[in-house]
Image (spheres, rainbow, N blue to C red):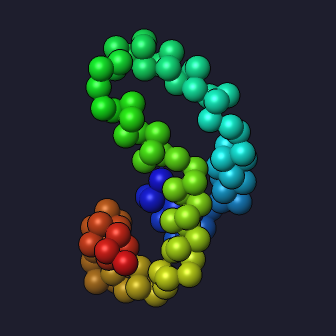
Amino acid sequence: STMTAYAIHVYDFKIKKFMFTFIMAVMTIPTQVTALGFLQLVSDMKLEDNFIPLIVPAIAAPVTFFYMKQYMESALPLSLVEAARIDGSGEFRTFNTIVLPL
């Protein structure tokens, strides 16, 4: 979710607004509606006695995306990202060493 928020905040592409709207629309769907499908997926993947089904929904939650995007809009200047690119930093290094610590 954090990397998705970073990509939508930093890059300009055609479907940027659509992606944001789609993720926000997914956020309006109640958890109870998707729970049965998620439980079937967990069962098919044989992950019943594992921590992965507890961790993945929390990491990929639309609410996490929304909060991170709002935070990046208010606290992450694009000039900082551009300066890292000019200095030769790759996208993952910029994300991991500059954006995440902020």
Q: Position of residue 49 (x, y in %)?
A: 30, 20
Relative horizontal placement of residue 28, taking residue 70 as reference (left or right)? right
Question: In the image shown, does 13 or 102 lie closer to the viewer?
Answer: 102
Viewport quadrant of the C terminus: bottom left
Q: Position of residue 73 (x, y in %)?
A: 57, 77
Residue at image position (33%, 32%) is: 52
Relative horizontal placement of residue 91, taking residue 64 as reference (left or right)? left
The mark tally for this picture is: 0
36 shown above or below 61: above
71 shown above or below 4: below
Residue at image position (27%, 77%) is: 88
Residue at image position (62%, 35%) is: 31
Q: Position of residue 62 (x, y in %)?
A: 58, 50
Relative horizontal placement of residue 14, taking residue 94 as reference (left or right)? right
Camera sees residue 15: no
23 shown above or below 97: above
Camera sees residue 93: yes
Residue at image position (42%, 12%) is: 44
Q: Position of residue 11 (x, y in %)?
A: 54, 67
